[in-house]
Image (cartoon, grey):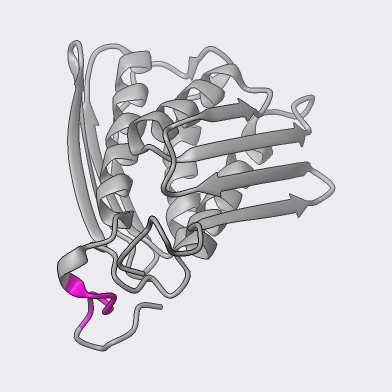
Amino acid sequence: MTDTGTAAPRAAGVRRETRETAVALSLRLDGTGAATVRTGVGFYDHLLSSLAHHGLFDLDIDVTGDLHVDEHHTVEDVALVLGSAFAQALGDRAGINRFGDSTVPMDESLATAVIDIGGRPYALIDVPFRGERVGTLPTQLVEHALESFARTAGATLHVRGAGRNDHHLAEAVFKALGRALRVACEIDPRRGGAVASLKGVLE
């Protein structure tokens, strides 16, 4: 697992269907940042595409959701499936850096994401938005999406941000998360395929 050029691709495909949503997602960790995202919530598509682009993950998401009710189920379920895809693609998580962090500015906004993908789900999100929506995305769902992602990815995630423009702030958050994930998921050649834990296992 120390040579991603010859090892099996670190990739996953996940489907989740309920009475509220149908989500089909494919993820390749060692990609180029190519993303095709169709959730039906335009700004959420933009945020997820930014995460993939700056994390250099290849990501394809296709969703049919009950947007006639509201955006909640679609945003939540996509985040849950994305987290599951990361967990599957990482496998036993052997050889990875495990930890990653990034701080990203976007004009007046600044966001920091710190992540441990060692199997312990927890999220602490401090991103105060000023308005109720950016486009059709309720800003309160940004925090919920990050929490949902951390839960199924098996990640401890801390995110903090501040800014005057909600669009800039949310985008800085997802760019920072993408860059932090990229570092955490990358193989550390010095570790020789071992797990980055004194316990000898990440779960």
* Image location of residue 158, percent across then percent down: 26, 50
> Looking at this rendering, what residue extends furthest in the front direction?
6
* Image location of residue 174, percent across then percent down: 36, 32
Query: Which of the image's four quarters has the C terminus?
Result: bottom left
- Residue 194 covered by magenta stretch: yes
Q: Main secondary structure of the magenta part?
A: loop
* Image location of residue 77, percent across then percent down: 64, 46
Q: Residue at x 19, y 86 (%)?
A: 198
Decide if residue 118 is on the left or right side of residue 13: left
Front residue of this view, candidates 156 and 187 = 187
Q: Residue at x 42, y 34 (%)?
A: 32
Q: Which residues are magenta?
A: 191-197
Q: Residue at x 42, y 61 (%)?
A: 6
- Residue 166 covered by magenta stretch: no
Front residue of this view, candidates 99 and 125 = 99
State whether residue 115 appears in this view. no
Q: Residue at x 43, y 34 (%)?
A: 52
